[in-house]
Amino acid sequence: MAFDFEVLLVGLTAISGVVWLLNALVFRSDGVMAEYGRSFFPVLLFVVVLRSFVVEPFRIPSGSMIPTLQIGDFILVNKFSYGVRLPIVHTKLVDLGGPERGDVVVFRFPAEPKIDYIKRVVGLPGDEITYIDKRVFINGEPVPVSVIGTVDDPTGRGVQTIEVEETLGDKSHRIHLQNTSYTRQTRTVVPEGHFFVMGDNRDNSSDSRRWGTVPEANLAGKAFFIWMNFSKQSGMDFDVDWKRIGSRIH
């Protein structure tokens, strides 16, 4: 079972708040518990508000978004891009619109909502998305692409990998395609209130081609900034890619 940090954080905030309030109104003591309440409640409340309504950090654990995001990237997610939601229950308080094609979004995985995924929005509600011969078609029209060239296989398996610039609406980004004969062929009509998402590492991504669309209620926010890169190379060795720090996510 996935660990739910959000529930733990809100629970600790509530407990420290109750301790602080009871001491202020009833006990009026200067004991250890009272000091804990006074010290931790403001800090925890600030973290909950910041994480729930403003910005939240995430770490990229897999290579499904290569080349846009690398394993070990630490990113920031704008939590109010698509609306303001309550923590834990995720009820929307303020609607600020929905994702656009090309947005990189963090969302709760539909099959196991305690797990966060990050992918790129390809299809909007009502779109027909077809994926065939490594090309994306939206409502029958092929998504514009241009080949940049071959790159090293990030999986280390030695498969020829091609870097391609893809344009969704007015947004361009780079994706990786492996030069193999196998390809998934799918056709999906995106339901209302859902989004079709794909990884930029197209042949190494578990996404809407495999498990379906993402409900709007599962969206956590829009990824917009890389604030650190801290990847494990081998054994206990770690490496920082300084060039990635401070990069905006497109």
Image (cartoon, rainbow, N blue to C red):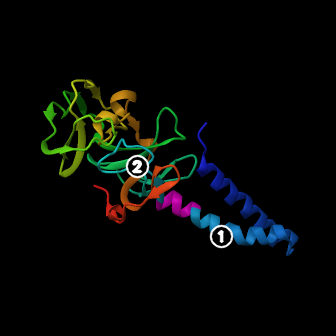
Q: Is residue 139 magenta?
A: no
Quarter in which the C terminus is drawn: bottom left
Magenta highlight range: 48-55
Q: Is residue 206 above or below residue 107?
A: above
Secondary-structure class at tag 2: loop
Which of the two residues, 239 or 18, is positioned nearer the viewer here? 239
Which of the two residues, 209 or 243, is positioned nearer the viewer here? 243
- Residue 250 falls left or right of residue 76: left
Q: Which mark is residue 6?
A: none
Q: Position of residue 168 (x, y in %)?
A: 20, 45
Amino acid, disc 2 = Ile
Q: Position of residue 176 (x, y in %)?
A: 25, 41
Q: Position of residue 113 (x, y in %)?
A: 52, 38
Secondary-structure class at tag 1: helix
Residue underneath mark 2? 71
Mark found first going from the N terminus, 1 or 2:
1
Residue underneath mark 1? 42
Q: Which mark's residue is nearer the viewer, 1 or 2?
A: 2
Amino acid, disc 1 = Pro
Quarter of the image for residue 191 reads: top left
Around disc 2, counting alpha carbons within 10 Å, would you say few (fewer than 14), some (14 to 19), or many (20 or more)?
some
